Image: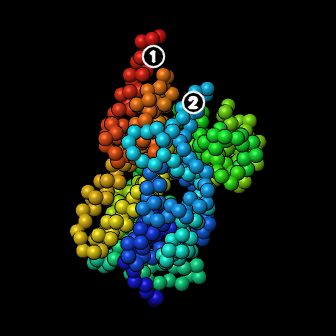
Amino acid sequence: MNKEVVDVLVIGAGPSGCVSSAWLHNNGLKVKVVEKTKFPRFVIGESLIPRVMDHFEEAGLLDALKSQKFEIKPGARFIRGEEVCVFDFSNKFGEGWDWTWQVPRADFDNVMAQEIIRKGVDLEFESEVTDIRFDGSNSITTVKDKNGDTKEIHAKFVIDSSGYGRVLPRLLDLEKPSSLEPHSSIFTHVKDTTRVPGQEGTLISFDILETEVWLWVIPFSNGNTSVGIVGPTDYIDQLSQSGNTEEALRCAINKSDYYRDRYGKLEFLFEPRRLTNYSCAVKQLYGDGYALTGNAAEFLDPVFSSGMAFATESGILAAKLAKRQIEGETIDWEREYSDYILSGVRVFSTYVKEWYTGNLQTLFFHQPENPDIKRKICAVLAGYVWNKDNPFVKKHDHVIRNLAYLIENEKEIKL
């Protein structure tokens, strides 16, 4: 069997894999990336948050992405009936990027993949990891290519950025149930012939149909728009008695007073796809000789677009720690990696849970607005969930619930 020897093997060429492999390559390590699919390939997760821009810049990928002129995302809008709440990333607590992008992921991910190839990273498409074993300080990974031929890749460290493929969680029995309630989604793209000029036509929007049910609208710079419905799995099941995804999504759009006329009759560019019970978790984020990043580790919920931020945050951190370990340093992976990443996951998990309880929506739509509270929540929505100077990060486990309780009590007193 053929054998390759590298410093680091990266599984998956999505944002996490590209960021980690680019950083490793830029810092002098020999890295190999194996990707099961052929790019460009369709994937969901089309809305980014500003924290990812730090990682693209540090990995040397920012200029290539900027050149594509993807749709700028300066904030996000939440709609509930006639109520509207707009968050502006330039008006948030603390430092950080003021904007990011809304992207067709097939194009976006392909730009990054081609850029790391241009930089000199060895990226092999249509190659699947079928087995892995660890031998002391080294790993031996069996990879099968598109022709069915197999080879071994010997690496000093493995970074699993395989996303929903969750390669190492499956091979090493690391899967565990998510703590979040089961939700599902149906989505497609439309040719946005009804797009209106200005911010109204380009700003990402979340239209709340019921407390736990919302419609996303994500306009792209290519003239298309992503439209999707998210809700409890049993609710999504009931949108179409026959299980037809097109019927279900049209039913959902027609429930939206805001978007019914705009998108209700537009042709879908592909048969709507469904993700069922998408939240996932793992027993551990690292082991001897490997680290899990992005969706290979944890996926929460699409409501605040946190997926890619955790992917790139964990990808670049895993790369930095792997380099230090390969160079002989003893790394406290529990403290420097797992504790750090999971502290951010816990913050966003709270916001997701409080969104679906309705408490966070109470804060969003409360009038008159409290500018200070809004700036602090905006920083969380921008992905700066490790900044403990922000009380809405540090006290996330009770601050939203307590404020919502006070607002509701205030309403009752006035009545």
Vertical order, 405 against 249 (above or below): above
Residue at point 59% right, 43% down? 204
**Which percent across, then down, holds residue 391?**
33, 36
Vertical order, 413 against 392 (above or below): above
**Which percent across, then down, holds residue 251?**
69, 39
Nearest to the eye among marks 1 and 2: give it.
2
Q: What amino acid type should be assigned to the residue bearing mark 2?
A: Val
Q: Which residue is the site of mark 1?
A: 411
| Mark 2 neighbour density, 10 Å: few (under 14) some (14–19) many (20 or more) | some
Pick whichever, 387 or 140, lies toward us. 387
Furthest residue toward left: 330
- Left of 249 or right of it: where is 77? left
Q: How many marks?
A: 2
Residue at point 51% right, 37% down? 87
Label 1: which secondary element: helix
| Mark 1 neighbour density, 10 Å: few (under 14) some (14–19) many (20 or more) | few
**Which percent across, then down, holds residue 292?**
39, 63
Pick whichever, 122 or 2, lies toward us. 122
**Is any part of residue 402 visible from this angle?**
yes
**Which percent across, then down, holds residue 282?**
38, 57
Q: What amino acid type should be assigned to the residue bearing mark 1?
A: Lys
First in residue order: circle 1 vs circle 2: 2
Label 2: which secondary element: strand
- Left of 193 or right of it: where is 19? left
Q: How far apart are marks 1 and 2 (CA)?
A: 19 Å
Q: Which residue is the site of mark 2?
A: 84
Residue at point 60% right, 36% down? 207
Furthest residue toward bottom: 1
Pick whichever, 218 or 170, lies toward us. 218
